[in-house]
Image: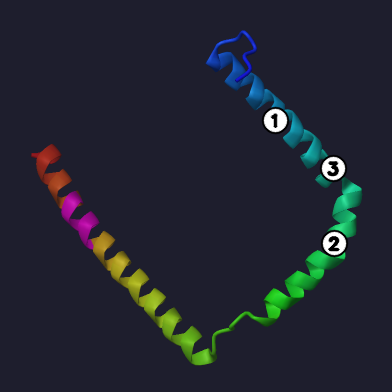
């Protein structure tokens, strides 16, 4: 085993810095505008394939989920209104008397 005359912590930091430098050069090559323009046709092809595999809901499913959401919102409104009515009565009783 070769030693560099440095502690294990210093060696670890140096190896991390070397690793970060190698990542920077590889990322720099893939982050340029030219590379992104070259990759655009492949990206659009993949988007088209994914769009074809999307399962769109039918009218019955949209209607049923809409009814569920509206019903939940109405129940929430009723709950908050009741809570407000109770707390406002409590507020009047505590601070007016």
At numbered mark 1, what does the secondary structure look like: helix, strand or loop? helix
From the viewer's perspective, is residue 50 above or below residue 77?
below
Quadrant of the frame with the C terminus: top left
Task: Write down the quadrant of residue 70 in the picture.
Answer: bottom left
Kindly report the distance in space between the C-alpha atoms of the residues bearing marks 1 and 3: 14 Å
Q: Which of pointers 2 and 1 lies earlier in the amino acid sequence?
A: 1
Kindly report the distance in space between the C-alpha atoms of the residues bearing marks 2 and 1: 28 Å
Q: Which of pointers 1 and 3 lies earlier in the amino acid sequence?
A: 1
- Can you give x and y, in whole percent of width and height, for residue 36 in the image? 85, 53
| Magenta-highlighted residues | 82-87
Q: How many marks?
A: 3
Residue at 71 percent of width and 26 percent of height: 18
At numbered mark 2, what does the secondary structure look like: helix, strand or loop? helix
Q: Which tag is nearer the camera, tag 3 or tag 2?
A: 3
Kindly report the distance in space between the C-alpha atoms of the residues bearing marks 3 and 2: 16 Å
Depth check: 81 or 65 in front? Answer: 65
In the drawing, what numbered circle is on residue 40? 2
Q: Which of pointers 3 and 2 lies earlier in the amino acid sequence?
A: 3
- Can you give x and y, in whole percent of width and height, for residue 91 in the image? 17, 44
Left-right relation of 30 to 94: right
Q: Circle 1: is it few (<14), some (14-19), or many (20+) Cα within 10 Å?
A: few
| Residue bearing mark 3 | 29
In reply to whether residue 89 is colored magenta, the answer given is no
Depth check: 7 or 32 in front? Answer: 7
Residue at 75 percent of width and 33 percent of height: 22
- Can you give x and y, in whole percent of width and height, for residue 16 in the image? 64, 26
In the drawing, what numbered circle is on residue 66? none
Residue at 70 percent of width and 30 percent of height: 20
């Amino acid at each position: 085993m070769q030693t560099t005359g440095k502690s294990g912590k210093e060696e670890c930091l140096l190896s991390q810095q070397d690793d970060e430098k190698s990542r920077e050069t590889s990322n720099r090559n893939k982050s340029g505008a030219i590379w992104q323009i070259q990759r655009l046709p492949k990206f659009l092809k993949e988007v088209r394939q994914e769009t074809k595999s999307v399962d769109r809901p039918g009218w019955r499913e949209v209607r049923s989920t809409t009814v569920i959401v509206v019903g939940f919102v109405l129940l929430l409104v009723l709950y908050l209104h009741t809570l407000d009515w109770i707390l406002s009565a409590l507020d009047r009783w505590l601070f007016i008397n």
